[in-house]
Image: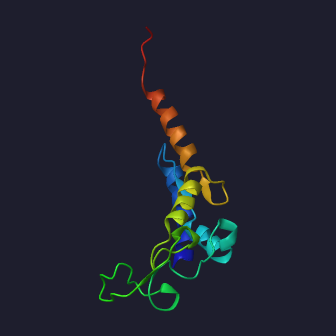
Amino acid sequence: MAKLHNKELPKTLQKLETQLEGFKYAYYNFYKSVGERLNNPSKYGFKDATTACCGSGPYGGVYSCGGKRGITEFHLCENPSEYFFFDSYHPSEKAYQQFAELMWSGTTDIVWPYNLKTLFEAKTSNLYDHFIIPSP
């Protein structure tokens, strides 16, 4: 489903850009970012990309972190930044930080046609085109 979404959404965004005057967007390939980290965890500073930092059961895959979901026993790792997954559903803070940095200033192989920094810079510079600023 994610692959199909990632294939079709860019087409729709490109179509909207031609139909809507001034429409600009940033498309971030989250699927690719996650896959790269799962396949090469050490390249991105992770020691473990298969086991959750917090949880129970095989690979920490039982969503029990905090003991408030009917299962009171769980394991919490000492260094969450070594893990790609914090719990069985969520990436760790370190992973989210990397994703945010990629969205903000990543190259066109992961975020296109603009990263967020470029998009916001373009939007703010275009704002001044619509105002007449009186000279002193």
Q: Is residue 88 above or below residue 9?
A: below
Q: In this view, does 31 lie above or below 114?
A: below
Q: In this view, does 110 lie to the left or right of 96?
A: right
Q: In this view, does 64 lie to the left or right of 97?
A: left
Q: Is residue 10 above or below residue 51?
A: above
- Judging depth in this view, the residue of 87 and 14 nearest the camera is 87
Q: Position of residue 64 (x, y in %)?
A: 38, 84
Q: Which residue lies furthest to the front in this view?
A: 78
Q: Position of residue 19 (x, y in %)?
A: 49, 51
Q: In which quarter of the image is the C terminus?
A: top left
Q: How many labels does the image show?
A: 0
Q: How is the image coloured?
A: rainbow
Say which residue appears at 39% left-offset and 80% top-offset.
65
Figure quadrant of residue 72: bottom left
Instruction: Examine the rendering and report whether any part of residue 1 can be seen.
Output: yes
Say which residue appears at 40% left-offset and 84% top-offset.
63
- Judging depth in this view, the residue of 54 and 31 nearest the camera is 54
Q: Position of residue 34 (x, y in %)?
A: 58, 71
Instruction: Examine the rendering and report whether any part of residue 14 can be seen.
Output: no
Q: Which residue lies furthest to the top in this view?
A: 136
Q: Position of residue 116 (x, y in %)?
A: 54, 49
